[in-house]
Image (tube, grey):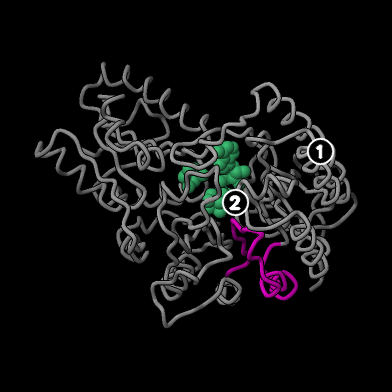
Amino acid sequence: MSKHVYIKTFGCQMNERDSEIMEQLLAQSGYIPVADQTDADLVILNTCSIRAKAEQKVFSLLGSLRKQKQGQPELRIAVAGCVAQQEGKQIFRRMPHVDIVVGTQQLYQLPEMLGRLERKETAREISCNLDKEFSIPPFQRLLKDDAPNQPADFRKFVTIMQGCNNYCSYCVVPTTRGREISRPVADIREEVQLQVNRGVKEITLLGQNVNSYGCTNPVAENPTGFADLLKMVAAVPGVQRLRFTTSNPQDLSTELMQCFRDLPNLCPHFHLPVQAGSNAVLKRMHRKYTRELYLEKVEELRSYCPGIAICTDVIVGFPGETEDDFALTMDLLERVRFHGSFSFKYSDRPHTRSAEFTDKVEEQVKGERLQHFQSRQDAISLERNQEFLDKKIEVMIESNTSTGTQGRTGSNHIVHFSTPTNLRPGDLAWVTITRAGQHSLKGELAPPEAS
Ligand code: SAH
Ligand code: SF4
Ligand code: F3S
């Protein structure tokens, strides 16, 4: 009898990619994915610990799974990802109904761990060691039993590096994902090629700090920098769209910025987290750039690619952030006029330096600052989106149903339109923008652009 797995993913795209990998590995052990946790024999929570709220969500879901397990004692519950890495066996103590805790580098062991449980060799399984020499196994191993009839998604993530060495003072990632390690170029090229052969049109390269790709490459004779890697991937025939995330402003090179001018399939969208607009705050965050350097980089980027959509991450209420510091963040928002941003209230995280800082900002003040930032960002996003009005833009189709068609621009904007044609996800189409909202655009199908 086949077994069913439900995987719930929290957090970043790296976790999304890891969930796909777990799904593929488990398919080889006969697990079929289901969309409802109540239909599952195995529930995996692939968790995120980046902010206190993210972690709370995991524990409240685990609480509700306890009830499900009372009525379904054979249900297996696994906790993977960054909370698993951070909490380790504490999870069993807090949540005794959990069967498996699997760390961020151990997801490849999941089938063996489940096998031992099924054979009743062990009552519980845990594997959470972080290995300095860890390397992501080559992708072909995962693909060999991939259901051949199942069409690949039109877009895929390709992880190019693991971990982070930056130690921003507020961030758990260096402890949950370990030391920064770049994957060998040959593995990345092969994975991209395999994905394209399966019909994938858009590739997003993933790393916490892609700009330092290659600095930590275990293959020392292969000192490829990120810009070179990007050029190599862009040149793989069939890669129609290429994106990457995330980039740290501190080592954003001119060579990388020029890729936006020189590589036609590199999408004109750049996620460049600034975190704060005050140099004093940036310094205590251990971000190794200044607001001036950030603004220079934005200007240089726009000189190579004037239409590029720049997005960012911002933390408000970092310990010691004064009204004047926050005003500098608002000022930076006005100067850059980001197309969009993700903004968060600072929260203390385990084993981070800023958790020890004593000058914490009050919750209420953090809330007010967040609201202030977000309402101004919303207004700017709307104005930015209005710049698209009457323009003819190429979109990649994401869905096409009787209720409407959704596509995405290279700049990462969602466009809703309708079409009588049989466009499929991954197809490209031209659309004239007729309406602009804060979070999406509306348009009409236009004749293709002459190339
Ligand atoms: N590697 C990326 C960020 C990954 S984490 C970079 O260097 O920019 C995603 C975002 O979560 C961060 O950019 C930051 O804005 C936010 N974040 C991280 N730790 C946080 C904390 N302790 N409190 C609030 N927000 C946090
Ligand atoms: Fe965290 Fe900083 Fe690394 Fe980003 S660069 S993952 S914020 S430590
Ligand atoms: Fe969250 Fe871990 Fe990603 S903490 S943001 S899932 S690297």
Say if 203 sits above or below 231 in the image. above
Distance, label 1 to label 2, CA atoms, is 20 Å
Find residue 286 and name its label: 2
Determine crowd level at label 2: few under 14, some 14-19, many 20+ residues with C-alpha closer than 10 A.
some
Which stretch did the figure color magenta? 239-267
Q: Which of 366 and 155 is in front in this view?
A: 366
Q: Which residue is drawn at 10% across and 36% down?
A: 120
Q: How many labels does the image show?
A: 2
Secondary structure beneath dot 1 equals: helix
**Magenta span contains residue 262:** yes
Residue 96 visible to the viewer: yes
Quarter of the image where the C terminus is located? bottom right
Say if 194 sits above or below 405 in the image. below
Discs 1, 2 touching: Cβ within 8 Å: no
Q: Where is residue 202 in the image (x, y as percent from the top left)?
A: 58, 61
Judge left or right: residue 311 versus residue 184: right
Q: Position of residue 350 (x, y in %)?
A: 44, 37
Q: Does the residue labelled 2 lie within 8 Å of ligand 2?
A: yes
Determine the residue located farthest toward the right in the rendered image: 390
Q: Which residue is drawn at 30% across and 59% down?
A: 145
The residue under label 1 is 327
Residue type indicated by callout 1: Ala
Residue type indicated by callout 2: His
Judge left or right: residue 119 versus residue 185: left
Determine the residue located farthest toward the front in the rendered image: 358
